[in-house]
């Protein structure tokens, strides 16, 4: 992932050429063109995009939490790390 950058908005990595530095109240952060374009759309479309992203982020978090609960089923061998 050397030529990719993490988008704080959609929480995925994208090629650097599809990313822009975006000023937030917490400083400059990378944001993909797709989320920047979506933010410029009329409020109904923008809200729908936001709902889709929220659902996607919740599903990703749920899957990661499920994997965390399964860790006890697969103990590490001596010297391994996660």
Image: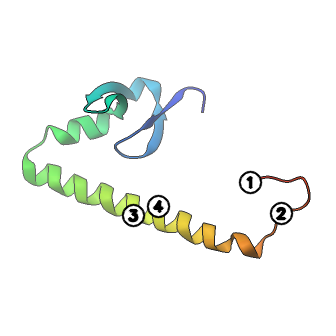
Q: Give the CA separation, mark 2 to mark 4.
A: 24 Å
The residue located at (29%, 27%) in the rendering is 22
Residue 48, given in percent of the width and then of the height, sits at 19, 57
Q: Earlier in the sequence, mark 3 or mark 2?
A: 3
Mark 3 falls on what kind of element? Answer: helix
Circles 1 and 3, Cβ within 8 Å, touching? The answer is no
The CA distance from mark 4 to mark 1 is 19 Å
Of mark 1 and mark 3, the one earlier in the sequence is 3
Kind of element beneath mark 2: loop
Badge 1: residue crowd in 10 Å (few <14, some 14–19, many ≥20): few
Q: Do labels 1 and 2 touch, CB within 8 Å? A: yes
Q: Residue at x 28, y 59 (%)?
A: 52
Of the residues under marks 4 and 1, which one precedes in the sequence?
A: 4
What label does residue 76 carry, if any? 2
Give the mark nearer the N terminus: 2 vs 4: 4
- The front one of 75 and 26 is 26
Q: Is residue 78 left or right of residue 62?
A: right
């Amino acid at each position: 992932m050397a030529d990719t950058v993490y988008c704080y908005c959609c929480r995925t990595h994208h090629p650097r050429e599809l990313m822009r530095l975006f000023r937030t109240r917490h400083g400059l952060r990378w944001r993909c063109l797709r989320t920047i374009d979506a933010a410029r759309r009329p409020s109904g479309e923008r809200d729908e995009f936001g709902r889709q992203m929220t659902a996607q982020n919740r599903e990703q978090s749920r899957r990661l939490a499920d994997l965390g609960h399964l860790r006890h089923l697969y103990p590490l061998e001596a010297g391994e790390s996660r």
